[in-house]
Image: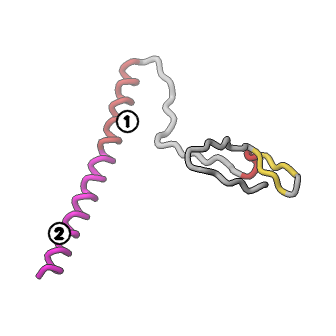
Amino acid sequence: MIPTVVTSGDVISLQRDAGVNAVFVPYESTHSMTTRSRSRPIEETSDPEEAGARKKQVVASSRTGTAKRQRMMQGRAQADDGQLTIDGG
């Protein structure tokens, strides 16, 4: 690789391959892709009643997570208030 002086506002295109001693190594072989799914796969169903029940179940689980986050944030705020009172007293 050759170092290049770049001034503000210049656009440099990204290269997908990195050269190592004149041997090119594909980008994909050095950077693996990691993905994580937030939900389990839902099986398809033709029964509208069952599909509605599954949708309610997914909505309920997302609300539960939100309530849990709210409790954690409230707990942190209370601990911070207590620390401020002790430091000020």
Q: How many marks?
A: 2
Q: Which residue is painted at 61% across and 48% down in the image?
A: 34
Tell which residue pokes out farthest to the right in this image. Answer: 22
Q: Which residue is painted at 37% across and 36% down in the image?
A: 58
The secondary element bearing badge 1 is classed as: helix
Residue 86 placement (x, y as % from top left): 16, 80
Any mark on residue 81, and which?
2
Residue 16 placement (x, y as % from top left): 73, 43
Q: Please tell me which residue lies in front, 41 or 11.
A: 11
In the image, residue 76 above or below residue 82: above
| Contact between labelled residues 2 and 1, with CB atoms less than 8 Å apart | no
* Circle 2 residues within 10 Å: few <14, some 14–19, many ≥20: few
Residue 38 placement (x, y as % from top left): 47, 43
Q: Please tell me which residue lies in front, 34 or 22.
A: 22
Any mark on residue 58, and which?
1
Q: Which residue is painted at 51% across and 35% down in the image?
A: 41
In the image, residue 32 above or below residue 86: above
What is the chief secondary structure element of the magenta stretch? Answer: helix
Query: Where the C terminus falls, by quadrant?
Result: bottom left
* Circle 1 residues within 10 Å: few <14, some 14–19, many ≥20: few
In the image, residue 24 above or below residue 43: below
The secondary element bearing badge 2 is classed as: helix
Task: Indicate the colouring scheme.
Answer: secondary structure
Q: Amino acid at mark 1?
A: Val
Query: Where the N terminus falls, by quadrant?
Result: bottom right
Tell which residue pokes out farthest to the bottom in this image. Answer: 89
Q: Is residue 51 magenta?
A: no
**Chain part drawn in magenta:** 64-89
Q: Amino acid at mark 2?
A: Asp
Distance Cα–Cα, label 1 vs label 2: 35 Å
Q: Please tell me which residue lies in front, 13 or 35.
A: 13
